[in-house]
C-alpha cells in the first residue's frame, strides 16, 4: 500500500511529500454557546442571515458542515423588526388543502398577531435542507417582547451592524 492510498480519506499530502492531518471535530469537541440578538429596528434579512450563521456554528474555527456545532440563538423584540420595501402591504396566501381553505393575510397582520413566525420562516429558509437543519432550528428561541426565560444560560450579546444608506 502506497502512502497515497493509506491517507486518502483523512490526510492531505503536500507537494514536498509531508503529511498534513485534517482536523475532524468529534462530538466531544463540539460546544453549544448561547447568543442573544435584539431585533429592534434590524432589517429582517440581515437578522436572518446572521442568526443562521450562528445556528449552524459557522462562526467557530471547528466548523464542519456535517457536524452539529451550532449555537443557541435567542431573538428578543421580534415585534420591532424592520421590514423593507413593500413587505408590510404585500399579501401572502396559504392553503389548508381542503375545499375553500385559501387564506390571505399581509405581513402587517402577521406582525401584529404572531411576529415570531416571520423571523422563524426567514431563518428556516437560510438553513440547509437536511436533517441537521431541524436540530439547528430547535435551538432558535424567538420572543416578541424583551423578556425571555433563558437568563440562567448567561447568553452573550451579538450585535448586528447596520449598513447606512450612504455606504451603498
Image (cartoon, rainbow, N blue to C red):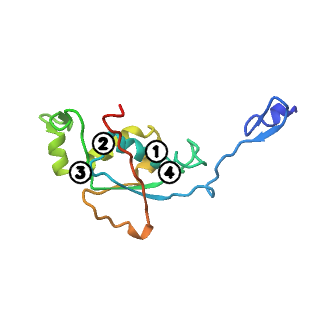
Q: CA distance from mark 4 to mark 3?
A: 26 Å
Which of the pair 23/159 is nearer the observer?
Answer: 159
Q: Residues within 10 Å of mark 3 (few under 14, many from 20)?
A: some
Residue that mark 2 sits on: 44
21 sits left or right of 42 in the view: right
Give residue 142's position: percent from left, percent from top. Answer: 32, 55
Compared with 76, 163 (above or below) is: above
Q: Name the quadrant of the C terminus.
A: top left
Give residue 16's position: percent from left, percent from top. Answer: 85, 31
Q: CA distance from mark 3 to mark 1?
A: 21 Å
Disc sitting over residue 53 in the figure? 1
Which of the pair 42/163 is nearer the observer?
Answer: 163
Q: Secondary structure at mark 1?
A: helix
Q: Name the quadrant of the N terminus.
A: top right
Give residue 48's position: percent from left, percent from top. Answer: 36, 43
* Image point (40%, 38%), residue name: 126
* Image point (18%, 45%), residue name: 110
Q: Are marks 1 and 4 in contact (CB under 8 Å)?
A: no
User: Which is more N-terminal, label 3 or label 2?
Assistant: 2
The picture quadrant where one finds residue 89 is: top left
Q: CA distance from mark 1 to mark 4?
A: 9 Å
Q: CA distance from mark 2 to mark 4?
A: 21 Å
Residue that mark 3 sits on: 80
Amino acid at each position: 500500500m502506497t502512502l497515497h492510498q493509506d491517507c486518502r480519506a483523512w490526510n492531505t499530502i503536500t507537494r514536498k511529500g509531508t503529511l498534513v492531518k485534517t482536523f475532524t471535530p468529534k462530538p466531544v469537541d463540539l460546544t453549544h454557546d448561547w447568543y442573544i440578538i435584539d431585533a429592534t429596528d434590524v432589517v429582517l434579512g440581515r437578522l436572518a442571515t446572521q442568526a443562521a450563521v450562528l445556528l449552524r456554528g459557522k462562526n467557530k474555527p471547528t466548523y464542519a458542515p456535517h457536524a452539529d456545532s451550532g449555537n443557541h440563538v435567542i431573538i428578543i423584540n421580534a415585534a420591532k423588526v424592520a421590514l423593507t420595501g413593500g413587505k408590510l402591504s404585500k399579501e401572502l396566501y396559504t392553503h389548508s388543502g381542503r375545499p375553500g381553505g385559501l387564506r390571505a393575510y399581509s405581513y402587517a397582520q402577521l406582525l401584529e398577531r404572531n411576529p415570531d413566525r416571520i423571523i422563524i420562516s426567514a431563518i428556516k429558509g437560510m438553513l440547509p435542507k437536511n436533517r441537521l437543519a431541524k436540530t439547528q432550528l430547535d435551538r432558535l428561541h424567538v420572543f416578541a417582547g424583551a423578556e425571555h426565560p433563558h437568563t440562567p444560560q448567561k447568553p452573550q450579546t451579538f450585535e448586528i451592524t447596520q449598513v447606512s444608506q450612504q455606504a451603498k
